[in-house]
Amino acid sequence: MNFDLVVVGGGPAGLAAAIEARARGLSVLLLDENEAPGGRVWQAQERREPRDKDDAFARETVAAFRRSGAEAHFGATVWAIEDHTVFWSEGGAARCATGGRVLLATGTTERPLPIPGWTLPGVMTVGAAQIALKTSGLAPTGATWIAGQGPLVLLYAVQALRAGGKITGVLDLSAADAPRRALAHMPGALRTPLLFGRGLAWRGRIIRASVPWLRASELRALGDRGLHEITFRAEGRERRESADTLLLHNGVIPSVQITRALGCEHAWDAAQRCWKPVTDEWGATSVPHILVAGDGAGDQDGRRRDCRAGSPRSARRRRSAKSTPPRATPRPGRCAPLMRAHSPSARSSTRSTRRARRRSTTPPSSAAARK
Amino acid sequence: VTAGRIREAVGLGCLGLNQLKALTRCGMGPCRGRMCGLTAAEVMAQARNVPVADIEPYRLRFPTKPLTLGELASLESAAA
């Protein structure tokens, strides 16, 4: 099987790339491990009732993907890429296909938070709990503690409460000087009022639900065959609390296994404390036909690059053969990182359309030079 | 592999994750370094008192996800 573009990962970035590439007439194959489109961010979107604008946007994008004419294989686990050939397993058999370009939209993984006792049954990650919530509607019961840091802690707490779950307390494990250091980033935060406001709203909801929020350190999970209690230091004293479930989270990091195995260049991101593939503004890695888009590209602020990172470049090939005018209508295609607001406000759509237009007329010299 | 075992390896002169793998098999469990890699690097960096970026990451190879020999064999017959 031959395709112009093979997309690995069917989350927001992968879906948007596939939709865009199809709209420009490319043949597209999309592969994803899950049973349905949406990835983790929009997990089981087709099976859930849309609750708000974000859900509506997610559903619209998934529907646009279903209509796009891209060949899609779900339950497909990619295990190797050799040159232009992508290998995957599906239904107990291995298969392969080739792509003129291969776009990796494999997202992120949770950064492990190894505390003493983290391997006890009853201790799991917030991300895992969120999957259980999204796919099976499982909300926590019993004494449930959430510990760690990052936006997912807030988001999950809000989602769990909304689903009727019970949260005993949230332990903020960020460093003691974190609020002071965060203050320096306040001007930047205020420049993204939607995101900032959303964070405040989540926090407000947790406060209104009377869930205790403690700055804590020295967290330990204790138990014999399973989690029984936790100990931590908060407000200057040792505390011991009974616990049935402890959910840990320490932010997310780009999944770099495939780009590493391909030998793509990577750079250390000191702010996020993780490795990221080095990409140009088209999303191309140091291996020219391999592109990265979405959270896996490490652009969780979603400002610098949109989900179509890979597609305009591939589209350019087609335009060189036959002149196609740039699309005039805005697309639901902005990068949607794990915690980002997906609300396609009129303003941002206009801006991204304008940018897409600019891109299609003036390819950057770096990309041109590589050709 | 415990954090203590990693620190012990550093004490023996181990500098990066690939050496660590040879010495302790850290990174050869079910996750193949997908989950433990960064944590192991952080522990090593702390023990060596160097930035994490200076710790050589795992050399990752395909297959990046587990597959059975049966699946692999099916690929050959499909190609034939």
Image: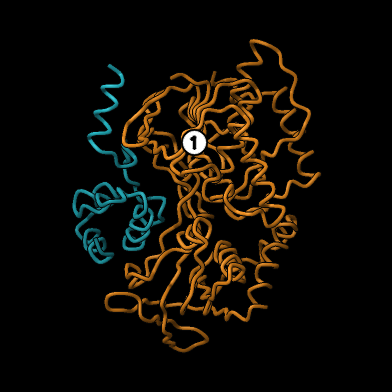
Location of residue A39 in the rendering, given as x and y in whole percent from the top left corner: 52, 46
Q: Which residue is mark 1?
A: A104
Q: Could you tell whether A52 is left or right of A165 in the image?
A: right
Along the viewing direction, whichever of A64 and A212 lies nearer the viewer: A64
Q: Position of residue A16 (x, y in %)?
A: 61, 36
Q: Which chain is cyan?
A: B
The quadrant in which the N terminus of chain A is found is top left
Classify mark 1: residues with Cα within 10 Å, few (<14), some (14-19) or many (20+).
Answer: many
- Colour for chain A in the figure: orange
Q: Is A235 located above or below residue B51 in the figure?
A: below
Residue A194, position as x, y percentages in the image: 74, 57
- Residue A87 picture quarter: top left
Where does the C terminus of chain A fall, quadrant-wise?
top right
Q: Is residue A272 above or below residue A167?
A: above
Seen as rendered, the residue at the extreme bottom is: A237
For mark 1, give the secondary structure.
Answer: strand
The residue lying at 48 percent from left, 55 percent from top is A273
- Name the residue at 49% across, 25% down: A289
Of residues A300 and A331, the one nearer the viewer is A331
Front one among B39 and B78: B78
Identity of the amino acid at label 1?
Leu
Judge from the rendering whether residue A71 lies leftward or rightward of residue A344; answer left or right: left
Q: Is residue B7 above or below residue A47?
A: below
* Image coords of residue A346 (percent x, y): 81, 44
Image quarter of residue A226: bottom left
